[in-house]
Image: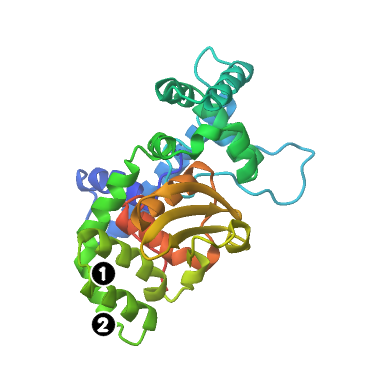
Amino acid sequence: MSTTPTQHVTNMIVWPRLSSTSILVSRNQGLSMGGTVGNLKFKMGNFRQRLRVAGCPELKVNTRTSSQTGSKKLKRAKKSEVNFLPGFPEGKTQHDLDIERSVLVSEMKKRKVDWRQIDEMMFNTFSLRRKEIVEDEPLVAQVKERWPALFSERQVEAEFARLTSVDLKGSLFAGLDQYLERFLELYKTKSGIAGLTRLIKCLDDDSSTQRKRTVLLLGLPHFLKEDPSHIFKTVEPTDIEDTFTKGMKVGIVTVKGEDIIDVLVVLEEAVVLSNLRDVPSAISMLMGLLFALNIDYPKELKYTFEIIQKVLMNIGGRQCSSL
């Protein structure tokens, strides 16, 4: 769990303490608040130092040695993960967990995979996987080679829950349904944006909830004045994979003939998930993988991903960046 309190958490702790004391009056409210917040941050600093000395991985990973010079990129939770870099299970060493990882890889090569066993081994090796991903920052292809089970819908959902304690698809779909009509009304007011107008017209033929969810997600980059080609692409079944994934770091590819044949998730110019039912499902898997692989949101799509995470999924919300 993160040891650095956010401003929202700080206010939740401080205001009840202040309101229960007799010193809080309107003329010294700011002084009391500032002093209490400073006191809380000082205590949290001491707490983090004790955790660092005790070997807490989330704090130890950023410890600098005397031989290191220059700036060092901080490895910390950026998407409100609550279990960012856990320690190894009690009584387990890195060697023990790596042996279990090897067994997991072998199991995934079988014609008939025992998914119950895979679930258990993925749960047991979570701390090793996070250590490798956070500390070593491997390429997606390297992670896929060492942890093939992670690139399945079942395990993307499980890993996301381990990281955030939130249901991946449930949170996204609930948020989509909650804000569906409001977003579509906003889209209709932007008649000068051709991409949004075209998407809204699609609802004339099919106004199902599923189609509305898709329109909401496809319309976000247009509405937020970002380039949708950085994340969404439509191809034909005959198109070559290496061609349409070239230059695509993060994205969703819809394979379409007369109807939608497949929806793919692309990371680092390679298809990492396929056979997805629709765009909302693909977006949920993309978000899950970005969390699981500790990949930063593309700068070109900063606002789009913030809306998906903080508004639709209600993770680390309260405030988004200003446009």
Q: CA distance from mark 1 to mark 2?
A: 10 Å
Give the amino acid at mark 1.
Phe
- Per the rendering, the mark at residue 183 is 1
Q: Nearer the viewer, residue 242 or 30?
A: 242
- Residue 165 at x, y = what percent? 35, 37
- Residue under label 2: 189
Camera-nearest residue between 175 and 69: 175
Tell me where residue 201 sits by quadrant: bottom left
Q: Percent position (x, y) of residue 263?
A: 43, 55
Q: Horizontal and vertical percent for residue 43?
A: 44, 37
Q: Is residue 24 visible?
A: yes
Q: Secondary structure at mark 2?
A: helix
Please say if 303 is above or below 125: below
Give the x, y percent position of residue 27: 26, 62
State the residue in front, 261 or 116.
Answer: 261
Occupied quadrant, residue 170? top left
- Name the residue located 49 percent from the left edge and 41 percent from the top edge: 292
Density class for disc 1 (Cα within 10 Å; few <14, some 14-19, many ≥20) is some
